[in-house]
Amino acid sequence: MSKKTILSGVKPSGIAHIGNYFGAMKQFVNLQNSHADVDQSFMQFFMIADYHGLNFIQNAKEMRENTLNLALDYLAIGLDPKKSHLFKQSDVSAHTELAWIFDTITTMPYLSRAHAFKDAEAKDKEISVGTFNYPMLMTADILLYDTDIVPVGQDQKQHIEYARDTAQKFNNIFGETFKLPEHLILENVATVPGTDGKKMSKSYGNTIELFATEGEIKKAVMSIVTDSGGDIPKNVYEIHKLFRSEGELAKIYEEHKGKYKNLKEALIEDIEAFIKPLREKREELAKNMPFVIKVLEDGANKAREVADKKLLDVKKKIGVSI
């Protein structure tokens, strides 16, 4: 049986928070551990999408720091270089080369239906070509590796449809070349509320950082907005559900009914118990940055091996490889 390939990718957009972890990061590691089994019938690529990030980050120092921090984050939560190939998108030039090839068979009206473009257009922003063309680079990311499964949230489903459409169009024009990838919608992914009750997001300034110190956790939790109209502070409880079962919480919240300070302190204790081992592992990894860089280099070597082979096939199909 041939190997099946899973591809995941994340932009290096800043400091990770618990919303990122429960919303996506945890699921990627779970997929790695459930699929990269002893018979190695699955191959997982995990891509730091720095060229996608260039649409948002245009400062070299920030990009380098965010990229290395993201690599550290994923290694700290359990991404295993023996099971997954962790690499930077920019280290594999086939991504941008294939994106251009796809541009030549893609129409502007088709791309103008993309959610990211529509969102940018609705905000009356000057839209970069990179934002407009985002789906074609993501399509290249996916199709280069003969990807079978792409784990995404519901809001990313359209990108997989773009990849499938483009694969079919290329195959129809130039002959059978690309697999049609399948999305894996992470149905049970939590929408994590922030300290103000809105969705946890760096742009809202309502996050609890994934590798926060105990003091930072305390400050964030104590700032959680509560209403005075009930026995259970809803925002505190919704975050607490991430760290304890609702059965366990029922007893705690009954014992401390109406005592918001006590319930926040219980949440602080549970978050610190969860974060402490991750924080300590990350601190150890950060002492050995040559190892982290080596992981990225090894991942890039494997990614290039697969991607360059696919790109050569594409070049033959379109007639530029003589």
Image (cartoon, rainbow, N blue to C red):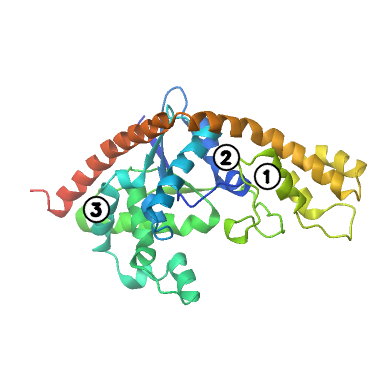
- Which badge, 1 or 3, is on the more N-terminal residue? 3
On the picture, is 210 further left or further right than 9?
right
Badge 3: residue crowd in 10 Å (few <14, some 14–19, many ≥20): some
Residue 129 position within the rendered picture, expressed as x and y whole percent measured from the top left: 34, 67
90 on left or right of 26: left
The structure residue drawn at horizontal position 54% and vertical position 52%, both measured from the top left corner, is 153
Residue at the image point whose x is 44% and y is 48% from the top: 182
23 left or right, relative to 232: left
- Report crowding for label 1: few under 14, some 14 to 19, many 20 or more residues within 10 A (C-alpha): some
The quarter of the rendered structure image containing the N terminus is: top left
Q: Amino acid at mark 1?
A: Glu
Q: Which element type, helix, strand or loop, lies under badge 3? A: helix
Question: What is the quadrant of residue 128 in the picture?
Answer: bottom left
Mark 2 — residue? Answer: 26
**Residue for point 77% across, 58% down:** 225
- SS label for mark 2: helix
Q: Earlier in the sequence, mark 3 or mark 2?
A: 2
In this rendering, which labeled residue sits more in front, label 1 or label 3?
1
Mark 1–mark 2 Cα distance, whole angstroms, equals 22 Å
| Amino acid under disc 3 | Glu
Q: Nearer the viewer, mark 1 or mark 2?
A: 1
- Could you tell me the amino acid type at mark 2? Lys
